[in-house]
Amino acid sequence: VPDYLETRMAHRPTHDLRAWDAYLTARDFYTQYDYVHNQNAIALFHEALRLDPDFGLAYAGLSDALVQESVFWNGQRLGQAIDAAYKAMRLEPNRGESHKALGMVLQARARNDDALEAYRRATEIDPGAWQATYNAAVILSDRDQLRESEALLLRTLELVPHHNVAMSRLGDVYLQLGDVEQARHWLDRAMERSPLRPRAVASYATLDVVTGRTESAISRCEQVLVVFSDNYSCLRLIATARLMEGDWDEACGLFNRMVGRWPEDGYARLGLAQALMANGKIDKANAHVDHVLDTSARKVAMHDHKSVDYWLLAAGHSIKGDDTGALRWLQTAADAGHNFYLWDSVEPAFDTLRDDSRFCLLY
C-alpha cells in the first residue's frame, strides 16, 4: 500500500466499516481511469454515503469521479460534482481531499485562479496530495508558467514515481524550455511504460522534428493514428512534417482534414494556407490566413486570448510577407510567456525570417 494511502487509512473518517470498505474500493476503481471503473466508483461512493450520510471524504471522492466523467466522457453531472465538493468542504474542511475535490470542480469550470488556491490549500494540509500537485502543474504549464510547472511535476513524481502522464508532461515542459536532453529523458521514461500514449508520442515526435528527424516523427504519429484516428497533435505533426519536406499535396490533404474537423483551429488553417500557396492557390490561401488574423485580433481586442493568439498573429503576418508585423507579434508572444523557441526555429511559417537578425535576437 502506498505511503500516502496508508496515512489516510490510519485516520479513518467514518465509524461504519462497510462505508469505509465501499469508499476504499471506489477510490481504487476511480484510479483505473477508464469509463467502466469510473462508473463503478460513482456507484460505490453513493453506497458509502447511503451507509454514512456524513462521510465527508466519500463526498470528495464522488465529486472527483463526477468531474472525471464530465471531463473525459462528456458527462452531464458537473452540477452534482459541485454540490458534493461543497458538502465535503462543510463536513471535512481540514482535509486535503476536500480542497482537492473543490479544486477539480473549479478547474473543470475554468476558474483556474480559484482552483490553484484550492490546490495550494490541499497540499498545505496534506503534503502528499499528489493529485492536487499534478493538477496545479497542468494549469501552470497551460499558462506558460513552465518553471513553476516543472517544480510541481517533479514533486508529483517524488510522490508517485511511476506517474506516466506526469513524466510525459514534464518532458513536454522541458521541450518548451529548450532543454532537449531533459525532454528526451522524461519522454523516454514515459514511453517505456506506455509507448502509444498520444500525448507522449506527440511530444517525442515534436522532439524528432526540431532535431531534424521528420521521418521518425511521422512514423511515431502514424502508429498512434491507427488507434486514435482523430488525434489532433499527431495529425498536426505529420502535416507539418510533410510541409517541411515539400510534399504539398499530402500536407494540403492533412491540413484540410484538420480544418474540417476543427474549423476554428488557427494552426491548421495556417498550415493549409502554406500548402495552398505552394500549389499556386493564392486566393484560397489568403482567405484562410485572413480568417486566422481576424479571429486572433478580435480575441486580443476583447482580452479573451492566450499567448498562442499572439503567435498565430505572428505566423499569419509572416505568411503574408509582413516581416515587421510578424516580429512585433512574436515579441509580444514572448513577453506574454510563449516559450516554445525550439519549435519556432523550424516552423515553416517563419522560414522567411530565418536570416533576419531581429528574429535571431528573439531566440
Image: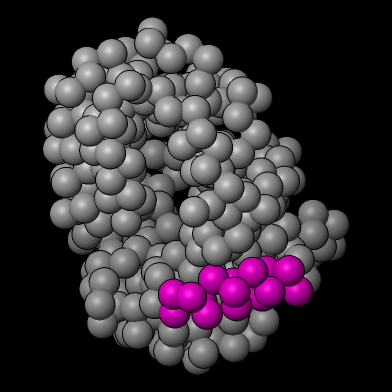
Judging depth in this view, the residue of 45 and 104 nearest the camera is: 45
Judging depth in this view, the residue of 90 and 195 nearest the camera is: 90
Q: Is residue 204 visible?
A: yes
Q: Can residue 207 be seen in this view?
A: no
Residue at (24, 73) in percent of width and height: 229
Residue 133 place in picture, x, y as percent: 58, 39
| For residue 322, above or below residue 243 | above
Q: Give the range drawn in magenta.
A: 180-195
Residue at (27, 60) in percent of width and height: 259
Magenta: main secondary structure equals helix
* Left or right position of 1 against 105: right
Its colouring scheme is one colour
In the picture, the quarter occupied by the C terminus is bottom right
| For residue 204, above or below residue 83 | below
Residue 106 place in picture, x, y as percent: 40, 24
Residue 155 place in picture, x, y as percent: 68, 47
Residue at (15, 22) in percent of width and height: 50
| For residue 107, above or below residue 168 | above
* Left or right position of 360 against 42: right
* Left or right position of 76 against 180: left
Residue 48 place in picture, x, y as percent: 21, 29
* Residue 89 in which image quadrant: top left
* Residue 190 in which image quadrant: bottom right
Q: Was residue 241 drawn as part of the magenta stretch in this picture?
A: no
Q: Determine the residue located farthest toward the top in the rendered image.
A: 90
* Residue 357 in which image quadrant: bottom right
Q: Was residue 188 drawn as part of the magenta stretch in this picture?
A: yes
Residue at (29, 78) in percent of width and height: 225
